[in-house]
Image (cartoon, rainbow, N blue to C red):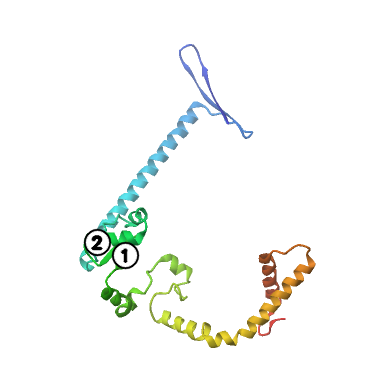
Amino acid sequence: MLLCIVICLNDKFFLSRVFSFLIVGHQWRYVINLETFQKYGFLVKNMFSFLTMSLFILLSLMSVYYLFSKFLTLESRPPLPPGPTPFPYIGSIISMLRNKPTFRWIHRMMDEMNTKILCVRLGNVHAIAVSDPDIALEFLKDKDWIFSSRPDSMSGYLTSGGYLDTVLAPMGDHWKKMRSILSMDILSGARHKWLLTKRNEEDENILRFFIGCTYLHTKMPNCSVVYTAYIKDQKDNFTPGLGCV
């Protein structure tokens, strides 16, 4: 792109009011006078000033909210185990990434602080590292119903449809019910043996479908494409109550 600035002189000492930009490239040109350039330049300057002020206000509000929430929860929450001083919002993620491997960094922090339990904040989540067998037994057995629950997050809530699954659901009655359904009705040995004939029949159908595709084509077919066509064919021939016909 070629940028040409043409300044027309009105006489020997004064510049003309015309200040033209000729931009050649991609088959288009644009000519603008000095007054329009000054007008839009003023708008662009105001836009950057507005964005800068908005960013400053946003950072100020976030800082005030962080300090206010920390002040409110400082007295109502019991003290956490010792750990490295975290950064606001991101915690100790940078320190963890800079000190690899992570487990050696954690052991080094425990030795420096002379403690067997360490709290490392990663974002808004507190990760607890334990090196004492008695404390670990309390985590894994005595207080398992507290520490085995997953932290609440918006992404997990939206992905699981309101924590209706088993993997992302927090510890509670729903999780216990889903675990019993999985262990007794879906992943049990009796259910596995009961569906053995169905699995063998489906395997034979897939093999026959692949063999038919190899007869129609001279070269080896793409397995993913063939399997997608097979699934589509099964869906098209599926009749509720009768299965695939």
Q: Is residue 10 above or below residue 38?
A: above
The answer to whether residue 38 shows anywhere in this view is: yes
Q: Is residue 36 above or below residue 128?
A: above
The answer to which image quadrant residue 222 occupies is bottom right
**The C terminus lies in quadrant:** bottom right
Q: Which residue is mark 1?
A: 126
Estimate the spatial distance between the alpha carbons at disc 2 and disc 1, rounded to whole Å.
Answer: 20 Å
Secondary element at tag 1: strand
Question: Residue 111: which disc?
Answer: 2
The answer to whether residue 83 shows anywhere in this view is: no
**What residue sits 52% from the left and 82% below the top?**
187
**What residue sits 31% from the left and 61% below the top?**
106
**Residue 63 point in image, percent of width and height:** 29, 53
Q: Is residue 58 above or below residue 111?
A: above
Question: Mark 1, residues whose alpha carbon is within 10 Å: few (<14), some, or many (≥20)?
Answer: some
Amino acid type at image mark 2: Asp
Secondary element at tag 2: helix
N-term-proximal mark, 2 vs 1: 2
**Residue 195 point in image, percent of width and height:** 60, 85
**Residue 219 point in image, percent of width and height:** 76, 62
**The N terminus lies in quadrant:** top right
Left or right of 170? Residue 112 is left
